[in-house]
Image (tube, rainbow, N blue to C red):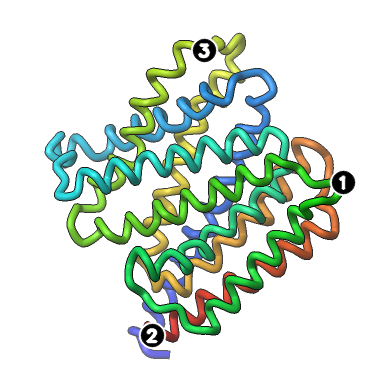
Amino acid sequence: MSEAAAQARQRLLLGIFFMCAATTLFPIMNGIVQVLSRSYPSEQIIWARTAGHLAIVLALVVPRYGFGVLATKRPGAQIARSLLLLASTTLFFFAVKDVPLAKAASISFMAPFFVTLLALPMLGERIDPKRLAAVIVGFLGVLVVIRPGSEVFQPASLLIVGSAFCYAVYQILTRRVAGLDRPETSVMYSALIGTLLMSCVVPFVWTAPDNLHDILLHLALGCLGAGGHWCVAKAMTYGQASVISPFQYWQMIGSVAVGYVITGLFPDAFTWLGASIIIAAGITIAVAESRRR
């Protein structure tokens, strides 16, 4: 193996490592949300997540770039991105109070399928038959997980579908501003508007943490969220997104593990089956995207 090939392989392995690290942090964050939801209002938990994320970004970005980092060529798109991310987080956090983490993670994997469908009207990208077939199969997998009409159907699962849709539009808008604004500007706006809005809401629902443990859990939300998103961004610098992105499905394993620690329960067979279908369809889209490029 040549030195160049060895370096490329090492970079790819680093990208995979950072993606797996991100998808390990996110289930831990979601598990903390589930635990805190037993005693604290969801609005307060969402504020802790967004405000903590913003505080970390400010500490890292402002000393280097100053507040000029807020200057943007597409203010409307940046504000829309922040609102969509807030909506996605809000829907997911309200849902995860009642939906097991593994099932929630499986349904959230719909986001890549929504991105594929929305790429045509929003970005002008064509959808070939193979990718469209994978999207349809992925949606069938989601139906297997949710099982609408059955006794085990949880209406809160639909909130996660909405969360995945909002996150997909957020990703597409992120693509649209990527060539116009610096990445640090987009990262700043991702948490800024959501924090401002939730700061107006949280005083009306605030429940003071009554022990150090709960205070630390509130603080951990922003750290885990910011750390996870940083790992995703770092992963994408080491290799092609189409190669590294499928490793986001490691989140399913983390969600199963964290869910078991919290509840002592494993996902049922239908959740495993549906998740397998969704993951297979998602990998098919990633491979098709790689070949198209």
Give the percent coordinates (x, y) of residue 108. Answer: 59, 53
Q: Residue furthest right?
A: 151
Characterize the local packing of mark 3: few (<14), some (14-19) or many (20 or more) Cα atoms within 10 angstroms.
Answer: few
- Classify 123 as above or below 67: below
- Looking at the image, tell me whether mark 2 or mark 1 is earlier in sequence order: 2
Q: CB atoms at circles 2 and 1 under 8 Å apart?
A: no
> Looking at the rendering, in which quadrant would you find the C terminus?
bottom left
CA separation, marks 3 and 2? 55 Å
- Looking at the image, tell me whether mark 3 or mark 2 is earlier in sequence order: 2
Q: In terms of secondary structure, where does tag 3 sit?
A: loop
Side of 287 relative to 278 (left or right) = left
Q: CB atoms at circles 3 and 2 under 8 Å apart?
A: no
Seen at 61% across and 41% down, the residue is 28
Q: In terms of secondary structure, where does tag 1 sit?
A: loop
Q: Which amino acid, mark 2? A: Ala
Q: Which residue is mark 2?
A: 5
Q: Which residue is mark 1?
A: 151
Q: Which amino acid, mark 3? A: Trp
Seen at 46% across and 51% down, the residue is 167
Give the percent coordinates (x, y) of residue 245. Answer: 49, 66
- Looking at the image, tell me whether mark 3 or mark 1 is earlier in sequence order: 1
- The picture quadrant where one finds residue 68 is top left
Seen at 63% across and 25% down, the residue is 36
The mark found on residue 219 in the picture is: none
Q: Which residue is mark 3?
A: 206
CA separation, marks 2 and 1? 54 Å
Give the percent coordinates (x, y) of residue 216. Answer: 54, 23
Q: In terms of secondary structure, where does tag 2 sit?
A: helix
Characterize the local packing of mark 2: few (<14), some (14-19) or many (20 or more) Cα atoms within 10 angstroms.
Answer: few
Side of 186 relative to 51 (left or right) = left
